Image (cartoon, grey):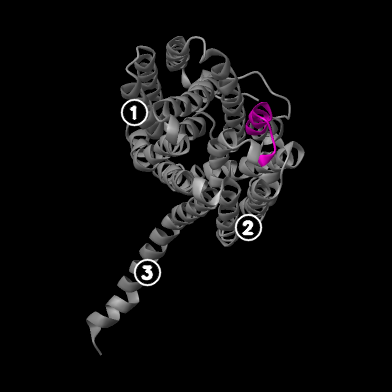
Amino acid sequence: MNLGGWTARRHLWPAVRAETSAAESATAPLALSDRASRDASVTLGLTLPGDTVLYLLLPLHAATFGVSLPEAGLLLAANRLVRIAGYGWVARGYHRFGPRAACVAATIGATAATLGYALTTGLIPLLLARLLWGLSFAALNIATQALATAEAEGAGRRSGRSRAIISTGPMLGLLFAAAFAEVIGPRQVFLVLGIIAVLALPVAVRLPSGPGQRLRMPSRRLTWPSPLDLWAFVQGLTLDGVFVVGLSVLAATVSPESATSAAGVSLALRYIAEIVLGPPGGIVAERWGAKRALVAVSLASAVGYAAIGAEAVWTGVIAVVLLRGLASPLPALVAAVANPGAARVPAIAAMATWRDLGAGTGPLIAGIVLPIAPWGLYIGAALLLAAVTLAFARLQATRWHWSG
Protein backbone atom coordinates (compact mmCIF):
# COMPACT_ATOMS: atom_id res chain seq x y z
CA MET A 1 0.00 0.00 0.00
CA ASN A 2 1.24 3.48 -0.82
CA LEU A 3 1.55 5.16 2.58
CA GLY A 4 1.92 8.65 1.09
CA GLY A 5 -1.23 8.28 -1.01
CA TRP A 6 -3.18 6.91 1.95
CA THR A 7 -2.05 9.81 4.14
CA ALA A 8 -3.04 12.36 1.49
CA ARG A 9 -6.48 10.82 1.05
CA ARG A 10 -7.00 10.41 4.78
CA HIS A 11 -5.79 13.79 6.05
CA LEU A 12 -4.91 16.28 3.33
CA TRP A 13 -7.67 15.92 0.73
CA PRO A 14 -10.57 16.43 3.18
CA ALA A 15 -8.89 19.60 4.41
CA VAL A 16 -8.45 20.86 0.85
CA ARG A 17 -12.07 20.04 0.03
CA ALA A 18 -13.22 21.83 3.19
CA GLU A 19 -11.20 24.94 2.29
CA THR A 20 -12.58 24.87 -1.25
CA SER A 21 -16.15 24.51 0.02
CA ALA A 22 -15.64 27.39 2.44
CA ALA A 23 -14.27 29.58 -0.33
CA GLU A 24 -17.16 28.70 -2.61
CA SER A 25 -19.66 29.42 0.18
CA ALA A 26 -18.06 32.81 0.74
CA THR A 27 -18.19 33.79 -2.94
CA ALA A 28 -21.66 32.36 -3.69
CA PRO A 29 -23.62 35.39 -2.34
CA LEU A 30 -21.46 37.75 -4.40
CA ALA A 31 -21.99 35.70 -7.56
CA LEU A 32 -25.75 35.64 -6.97
CA SER A 33 -25.76 39.39 -6.33
CA ASP A 34 -23.80 40.00 -9.53
CA ARG A 35 -26.22 37.91 -11.59
CA ALA A 36 -29.37 39.41 -10.03
CA SER A 37 -28.07 42.95 -10.48
CA ARG A 38 -27.17 42.24 -14.10
CA ASP A 39 -30.56 40.67 -14.93
CA ALA A 40 -32.50 43.55 -13.34
CA SER A 41 -30.37 46.05 -15.26
CA VAL A 42 -30.95 44.26 -18.58
CA THR A 43 -34.69 44.21 -17.88
CA LEU A 44 -34.79 47.95 -17.33
CA GLY A 45 -32.46 48.61 -20.26
CA LEU A 46 -34.79 46.79 -22.66
CA THR A 47 -37.95 48.57 -21.47
CA LEU A 48 -36.62 52.10 -20.85
CA PRO A 49 -36.31 53.26 -24.51
CA GLY A 50 -40.09 53.55 -24.78
CA ASP A 51 -39.98 56.35 -22.21
CA THR A 52 -36.84 58.21 -23.27
CA VAL A 53 -37.79 58.28 -26.94
CA LEU A 54 -41.15 59.83 -26.01
CA TYR A 55 -39.29 62.90 -24.69
CA LEU A 56 -37.74 63.24 -28.14
CA LEU A 57 -40.72 62.55 -30.42
CA LEU A 58 -43.82 63.74 -28.56
CA PRO A 59 -43.00 67.49 -28.52
CA LEU A 60 -41.88 67.39 -32.16
CA HIS A 61 -44.88 65.32 -33.39
CA ALA A 62 -47.64 66.22 -30.92
CA ALA A 63 -50.31 66.43 -33.63
CA THR A 64 -49.50 62.91 -34.80
CA PHE A 65 -50.41 61.64 -31.32
CA GLY A 66 -53.61 63.71 -31.21
CA VAL A 67 -52.51 66.14 -28.50
CA SER A 68 -51.50 69.79 -28.26
CA LEU A 69 -48.12 70.98 -27.01
CA PRO A 70 -49.45 71.84 -23.52
CA GLU A 71 -51.00 68.35 -23.34
CA ALA A 72 -47.67 66.87 -24.44
CA GLY A 73 -46.03 68.63 -21.50
CA LEU A 74 -48.59 67.13 -19.14
CA LEU A 75 -47.96 63.65 -20.54
CA LEU A 76 -44.19 63.99 -20.12
CA ALA A 77 -44.68 65.02 -16.49
CA ALA A 78 -47.35 62.44 -15.60
CA ASN A 79 -45.04 59.47 -15.12
CA ARG A 80 -42.94 61.37 -12.57
CA LEU A 81 -45.99 62.61 -10.71
CA VAL A 82 -47.36 59.09 -10.27
CA ARG A 83 -43.94 57.90 -9.10
CA ILE A 84 -43.88 60.60 -6.43
CA ALA A 85 -47.28 59.42 -5.19
CA GLY A 86 -46.59 55.70 -5.55
CA TYR A 87 -42.92 55.03 -4.78
CA GLY A 88 -43.57 54.00 -1.21
CA TRP A 89 -46.39 51.67 -2.24
CA VAL A 90 -44.27 50.14 -5.01
CA ALA A 91 -41.34 49.66 -2.64
CA ARG A 92 -43.56 47.86 -0.12
CA GLY A 93 -44.86 45.62 -2.90
CA TYR A 94 -41.32 44.92 -4.06
CA HIS A 95 -40.31 43.61 -0.66
CA ARG A 96 -43.51 41.71 -0.12
CA PHE A 97 -43.45 39.82 -3.41
CA GLY A 98 -39.74 39.87 -4.24
CA PRO A 99 -37.66 40.98 -7.23
CA ARG A 100 -38.98 38.41 -9.70
CA ALA A 101 -42.70 39.10 -9.26
CA ALA A 102 -42.19 42.87 -9.13
CA CYS A 103 -40.03 42.99 -12.26
CA VAL A 104 -42.21 40.60 -14.27
CA ALA A 105 -45.27 42.74 -13.53
CA ALA A 106 -43.32 45.92 -14.28
CA THR A 107 -42.06 44.50 -17.59
CA ILE A 108 -45.60 43.70 -18.67
CA GLY A 109 -46.73 47.19 -17.66
CA ALA A 110 -43.84 48.91 -19.44
CA THR A 111 -44.45 46.91 -22.62
CA ALA A 112 -48.16 47.75 -22.58
CA ALA A 113 -47.38 51.45 -22.09
CA THR A 114 -44.92 51.53 -25.00
CA LEU A 115 -47.38 49.77 -27.29
CA GLY A 116 -50.00 52.25 -26.09
CA TYR A 117 -47.92 55.12 -27.50
CA ALA A 118 -47.98 53.35 -30.87
CA LEU A 119 -51.60 52.21 -30.98
CA THR A 120 -53.66 54.86 -29.15
CA THR A 121 -54.39 58.53 -29.80
CA GLY A 122 -55.52 61.38 -27.61
CA LEU A 123 -54.83 62.68 -24.14
CA ILE A 124 -56.71 60.17 -21.96
CA PRO A 125 -55.36 56.90 -23.47
CA LEU A 126 -51.83 58.27 -23.55
CA LEU A 127 -52.17 59.58 -20.00
CA LEU A 128 -53.17 56.11 -18.79
CA ALA A 129 -50.14 54.66 -20.57
CA ARG A 130 -47.87 57.24 -18.91
CA LEU A 131 -49.25 56.45 -15.45
CA LEU A 132 -48.74 52.74 -16.06
CA TRP A 133 -45.19 53.37 -17.21
CA GLY A 134 -44.45 55.49 -14.12
CA LEU A 135 -45.40 52.70 -11.71
CA SER A 136 -43.57 50.11 -13.81
CA PHE A 137 -40.40 52.17 -13.83
CA ALA A 138 -40.62 52.68 -10.07
CA ALA A 139 -40.49 48.91 -9.50
CA LEU A 140 -37.66 48.36 -11.98
CA ASN A 141 -35.66 51.28 -10.62
CA ILE A 142 -35.94 50.08 -7.03
CA ALA A 143 -34.95 46.56 -8.12
CA THR A 144 -31.81 47.65 -9.96
CA GLN A 145 -30.58 49.85 -7.12
CA ALA A 146 -31.53 47.44 -4.32
CA LEU A 147 -29.92 44.42 -6.00
CA ALA A 148 -26.75 46.34 -6.87
CA THR A 149 -26.24 47.31 -3.22
CA ALA A 150 -27.50 44.06 -1.62
CA GLU A 151 -23.92 43.02 -0.74
CA ALA A 152 -21.53 45.68 0.56
CA GLU A 153 -18.56 44.05 -1.14
CA GLY A 154 -18.46 45.03 -4.80
CA ALA A 155 -21.47 47.38 -4.53
CA GLY A 156 -19.67 50.17 -6.35
CA ARG A 157 -18.62 47.88 -9.18
CA ARG A 158 -22.14 46.46 -9.54
CA SER A 159 -23.74 49.91 -9.45
CA GLY A 160 -21.43 51.23 -12.14
CA ARG A 161 -22.01 48.21 -14.36
CA SER A 162 -25.76 48.46 -13.74
CA ARG A 163 -25.90 52.07 -14.92
CA ALA A 164 -23.90 51.20 -18.02
CA ILE A 165 -26.23 48.32 -18.93
CA ILE A 166 -29.36 50.37 -18.32
CA SER A 167 -28.10 53.33 -20.33
CA THR A 168 -27.37 51.20 -23.39
CA GLY A 169 -31.09 50.78 -24.10
CA PRO A 170 -32.08 54.47 -24.16
CA MET A 171 -28.94 55.39 -26.06
CA LEU A 172 -29.67 52.91 -28.85
CA GLY A 173 -33.37 53.76 -28.79
CA LEU A 174 -32.72 57.48 -29.21
CA LEU A 175 -30.27 56.91 -32.06
CA PHE A 176 -32.78 54.56 -33.74
CA ALA A 177 -35.56 57.12 -33.38
CA ALA A 178 -33.37 59.95 -34.63
CA ALA A 179 -32.51 57.93 -37.74
CA PHE A 180 -35.88 56.38 -38.59
CA ALA A 181 -38.67 58.53 -37.09
CA GLU A 182 -38.94 60.62 -40.23
CA VAL A 183 -38.78 57.50 -42.43
CA ILE A 184 -41.25 55.10 -40.81
CA GLY A 185 -43.15 57.58 -38.64
CA PRO A 186 -43.00 58.25 -34.88
CA ARG A 187 -45.79 55.85 -33.94
CA GLN A 188 -44.10 52.95 -35.76
CA VAL A 189 -40.95 53.67 -33.76
CA PHE A 190 -42.86 52.87 -30.57
CA LEU A 191 -44.26 49.71 -32.11
CA VAL A 192 -40.69 48.48 -32.65
CA LEU A 193 -39.68 49.52 -29.13
CA GLY A 194 -42.69 47.70 -27.67
CA ILE A 195 -41.67 44.48 -29.40
CA ILE A 196 -38.13 44.89 -28.04
CA ALA A 197 -39.52 45.41 -24.52
CA VAL A 198 -41.15 41.95 -24.68
CA LEU A 199 -37.62 40.48 -24.76
CA ALA A 200 -37.14 41.65 -21.16
CA LEU A 201 -39.72 39.19 -19.84
CA PRO A 202 -37.55 36.02 -19.87
CA VAL A 203 -34.74 38.02 -18.25
CA ALA A 204 -37.04 39.20 -15.45
CA VAL A 205 -38.11 35.59 -14.82
CA ARG A 206 -34.48 34.76 -13.92
CA LEU A 207 -34.50 37.12 -10.93
CA PRO A 208 -34.67 35.75 -7.35
CA SER A 209 -38.15 34.58 -6.37
CA GLY A 210 -40.00 34.64 -3.09
CA PRO A 211 -40.70 37.53 -0.72
CA GLY A 212 -37.96 40.04 -0.06
CA GLN A 213 -36.51 41.13 3.22
CA ARG A 214 -39.04 42.67 5.62
CA LEU A 215 -38.07 46.33 5.85
CA ARG A 216 -39.34 49.56 7.30
CA MET A 217 -40.90 51.47 4.40
CA PRO A 218 -41.53 55.19 3.95
CA SER A 219 -45.08 56.44 4.27
CA ARG A 220 -47.07 57.43 1.21
CA ARG A 221 -47.04 61.11 2.08
CA LEU A 222 -44.06 63.22 1.09
CA THR A 223 -41.94 63.46 4.24
CA TRP A 224 -39.58 66.29 5.19
CA PRO A 225 -36.38 65.75 3.18
CA SER A 226 -33.11 64.70 4.73
CA PRO A 227 -29.96 66.48 3.48
CA LEU A 228 -29.43 63.61 1.04
CA ASP A 229 -33.02 63.93 -0.20
CA LEU A 230 -32.56 67.67 -0.66
CA TRP A 231 -29.41 67.10 -2.69
CA ALA A 232 -31.31 64.54 -4.82
CA PHE A 233 -34.06 67.11 -5.44
CA VAL A 234 -31.54 69.68 -6.65
CA GLN A 235 -29.78 67.08 -8.78
CA GLY A 236 -33.09 66.14 -10.39
CA LEU A 237 -33.98 69.78 -10.96
CA THR A 238 -30.65 70.75 -12.51
CA LEU A 239 -29.12 67.66 -14.12
CA ASP A 240 -32.33 65.80 -15.05
CA GLY A 241 -34.74 68.69 -15.62
CA VAL A 242 -33.21 72.01 -16.63
CA PHE A 243 -30.24 70.47 -18.41
CA VAL A 244 -32.23 67.98 -20.53
CA VAL A 245 -34.68 70.65 -21.69
CA GLY A 246 -31.87 73.11 -22.36
CA LEU A 247 -29.84 70.51 -24.22
CA SER A 248 -32.73 69.76 -26.56
CA VAL A 249 -33.34 73.47 -27.14
CA LEU A 250 -29.68 74.06 -27.93
CA ALA A 251 -29.58 71.17 -30.37
CA ALA A 252 -32.75 72.32 -32.13
CA THR A 253 -31.39 75.87 -32.34
CA VAL A 254 -28.09 74.80 -33.84
CA SER A 255 -29.73 72.43 -36.38
CA PRO A 256 -33.26 73.75 -37.02
CA GLU A 257 -33.72 71.73 -40.22
CA SER A 258 -32.79 68.43 -38.58
CA ALA A 259 -34.26 68.94 -35.12
CA THR A 260 -35.15 65.27 -34.56
CA SER A 261 -31.66 64.03 -35.41
CA ALA A 262 -29.92 66.80 -33.49
CA ALA A 263 -32.06 66.39 -30.38
CA GLY A 264 -31.83 62.60 -30.54
CA VAL A 265 -28.04 62.57 -30.75
CA SER A 266 -27.78 65.15 -27.98
CA LEU A 267 -30.00 63.14 -25.65
CA ALA A 268 -28.17 59.92 -26.56
CA LEU A 269 -24.86 61.49 -25.59
CA ARG A 270 -25.83 61.59 -21.92
CA TYR A 271 -26.45 57.83 -21.96
CA ILE A 272 -23.21 57.17 -23.79
CA ALA A 273 -21.48 59.03 -20.96
CA GLU A 274 -23.19 56.77 -18.40
CA ILE A 275 -22.14 53.65 -20.31
CA VAL A 276 -18.49 54.72 -20.54
CA LEU A 277 -18.07 56.51 -17.21
CA GLY A 278 -20.58 54.71 -14.95
CA PRO A 279 -18.28 51.75 -14.12
CA PRO A 280 -15.25 54.00 -13.40
CA GLY A 281 -17.53 56.10 -11.18
CA GLY A 282 -18.39 53.03 -9.12
CA ILE A 283 -14.72 52.07 -8.80
CA VAL A 284 -13.80 55.61 -7.70
CA ALA A 285 -16.54 55.45 -5.07
CA GLU A 286 -15.17 52.19 -3.65
CA ARG A 287 -11.61 53.50 -3.45
CA TRP A 288 -12.20 57.11 -2.52
CA GLY A 289 -15.56 57.02 -0.75
CA ALA A 290 -19.02 57.46 -2.27
CA LYS A 291 -19.84 60.74 -0.54
CA ARG A 292 -16.50 62.32 -1.33
CA ALA A 293 -16.80 61.33 -5.00
CA LEU A 294 -20.37 62.62 -5.19
CA VAL A 295 -19.42 66.00 -3.73
CA ALA A 296 -16.48 66.40 -6.13
CA VAL A 297 -18.52 65.49 -9.21
CA SER A 298 -21.43 67.74 -8.19
CA LEU A 299 -19.16 70.75 -7.69
CA ALA A 300 -17.51 70.10 -11.05
CA SER A 301 -20.98 69.91 -12.65
CA ALA A 302 -21.80 73.30 -11.16
CA VAL A 303 -18.69 74.68 -12.86
CA GLY A 304 -19.93 73.19 -16.14
CA TYR A 305 -23.27 74.94 -15.67
CA ALA A 306 -21.46 78.21 -15.01
CA ALA A 307 -19.56 77.75 -18.28
CA ILE A 308 -22.87 77.43 -20.16
CA GLY A 309 -24.10 80.57 -18.40
CA ALA A 310 -20.92 82.34 -19.50
CA GLU A 311 -21.82 81.41 -23.12
CA ALA A 312 -19.11 78.72 -23.43
CA VAL A 313 -22.02 76.51 -24.42
CA TRP A 314 -20.49 73.36 -25.85
CA THR A 315 -17.61 73.29 -23.38
CA GLY A 316 -20.12 73.38 -20.55
CA VAL A 317 -22.48 70.88 -22.19
CA ILE A 318 -19.73 68.33 -22.76
CA ALA A 319 -18.43 68.78 -19.21
CA VAL A 320 -21.87 68.33 -17.63
CA VAL A 321 -22.69 65.31 -19.80
CA LEU A 322 -19.44 63.56 -18.90
CA LEU A 323 -19.75 64.37 -15.21
CA ARG A 324 -23.36 63.20 -15.15
CA GLY A 325 -22.23 59.84 -16.48
CA LEU A 326 -19.50 59.62 -13.84
CA ALA A 327 -22.00 60.44 -11.09
CA SER A 328 -24.72 58.01 -12.21
CA PRO A 329 -23.92 55.16 -9.75
CA LEU A 330 -23.03 57.39 -6.80
CA PRO A 331 -26.37 58.43 -5.20
CA ALA A 332 -27.50 54.86 -4.49
CA LEU A 333 -24.08 54.08 -2.98
CA VAL A 334 -24.25 57.13 -0.72
CA ALA A 335 -27.75 56.14 0.40
CA ALA A 336 -26.59 52.58 1.10
CA VAL A 337 -23.63 53.75 3.20
CA ALA A 338 -25.75 56.22 5.16
CA ASN A 339 -28.60 53.75 5.72
CA PRO A 340 -27.24 50.28 6.45
CA GLY A 341 -29.42 47.24 6.98
CA ALA A 342 -33.19 47.56 6.90
CA ALA A 343 -33.19 51.29 6.12
CA ARG A 344 -31.28 50.94 2.83
CA VAL A 345 -34.10 50.39 0.31
CA PRO A 346 -36.52 52.85 2.00
CA ALA A 347 -33.78 55.48 1.78
CA ILE A 348 -33.25 54.74 -1.92
CA ALA A 349 -37.00 55.00 -2.53
CA ALA A 350 -37.27 58.30 -0.64
CA MET A 351 -34.26 59.74 -2.47
CA ALA A 352 -35.71 58.68 -5.82
CA THR A 353 -39.01 60.37 -4.92
CA TRP A 354 -37.30 63.68 -4.22
CA ARG A 355 -35.19 63.37 -7.35
CA ASP A 356 -38.37 62.78 -9.39
CA LEU A 357 -39.94 65.85 -7.82
CA GLY A 358 -36.92 67.91 -8.85
CA ALA A 359 -36.87 66.41 -12.33
CA GLY A 360 -40.55 67.24 -12.74
CA THR A 361 -40.04 70.82 -11.53
CA GLY A 362 -36.96 71.51 -13.68
CA PRO A 363 -38.70 71.46 -17.10
CA LEU A 364 -41.44 73.78 -15.81
CA ILE A 365 -38.85 76.30 -14.63
CA ALA A 366 -36.82 75.95 -17.82
CA GLY A 367 -39.87 76.46 -20.02
CA ILE A 368 -40.59 79.77 -18.31
CA VAL A 369 -37.05 81.14 -17.90
CA LEU A 370 -35.29 79.93 -21.07
CA PRO A 371 -37.04 82.39 -23.42
CA ILE A 372 -36.41 85.28 -21.01
CA ALA A 373 -32.96 84.74 -19.49
CA PRO A 374 -31.28 81.57 -20.77
CA TRP A 375 -27.84 82.41 -19.41
CA GLY A 376 -29.27 83.44 -16.05
CA LEU A 377 -31.03 80.07 -15.84
CA TYR A 378 -27.74 78.20 -16.03
CA ILE A 379 -25.91 80.58 -13.68
CA GLY A 380 -28.74 80.12 -11.17
CA ALA A 381 -28.61 76.35 -11.56
CA ALA A 382 -24.84 76.40 -11.01
CA LEU A 383 -25.14 78.43 -7.82
CA LEU A 384 -27.97 76.27 -6.46
CA LEU A 385 -26.16 73.00 -7.14
CA ALA A 386 -22.90 74.29 -5.66
CA ALA A 387 -24.57 75.69 -2.53
CA VAL A 388 -26.53 72.52 -1.72
CA THR A 389 -23.52 70.29 -2.41
CA LEU A 390 -21.25 72.33 -0.13
CA ALA A 391 -23.85 72.24 2.64
CA PHE A 392 -24.20 68.48 2.18
CA ALA A 393 -20.42 68.00 2.29
CA ARG A 394 -20.11 69.72 5.67
CA LEU A 395 -22.50 67.34 7.43
CA GLN A 396 -21.37 64.29 9.35
CA ALA A 397 -22.68 60.92 8.14
CA THR A 398 -25.03 60.65 11.13
CA ARG A 399 -26.88 63.76 9.95
CA TRP A 400 -27.33 63.04 6.23
CA HIS A 401 -29.21 59.74 6.43
CA TRP A 402 -32.92 59.25 5.72
CA SER A 403 -34.96 59.34 8.93
CA GLY A 404 -38.46 58.42 7.75
Residue shown at 60% from the left, 20% from the top: 364
Alpha carbons under labels 2 and 1: distance apart: 42 Å
In percent of width and height, residue 248 lies at 47, 29
* Res. 153 in view: no
Give whichever of discs 2 and 3 has the lower sequence position. Answer: 3
Q: Residues within 10 Å of mark 2 (few under 14, many from 20)?
A: few
N-terminal of the pair, mark 1 or mark 3, is 3
* Quarter placement of the N terminus: bottom left
Q: Which mark is residue 209?
A: 2
Which residue lies under the disc numbered 3? 17
Q: CA distance from mark 2 to mark 3?
A: 31 Å
| Number of residues whose C-alpha sits closer than 10 Å to that of mark 3, classed few (under 14), some (14–19) or many (20 or more) | few
- Side (left or right) of 109 relative to 263: right
Q: Nearer the viewer, mark 2 or mark 1?
A: 1
| Left or right: where 169 falls relative to 104 | left
x, y (%) of residue 243? 47, 24
Q: Earlier in the sequence, mark 2 or mark 1?
A: 2
Tell me, for residue 186, which label it has, or none: none
| Residue identifier under label 1 | 318
Q: Is residue 311 depicted above or below 289 in this figure? A: above
Task: Using the image, determine if residue 94 lies above or below residue 196.
Answer: above
Specify the amino acid type for callout 1.
Answer: Ile
The residue tagged with tag 1: helix, strand or loop? helix
Q: Is residue 164 above or below residue 235?
A: below
Which residue does the image show at 45% across and 59% down from the upper left?
Answer: 25
Q: Quadrant of residue 369?
A: top right
Q: Which residues are magenta?
A: 65-77
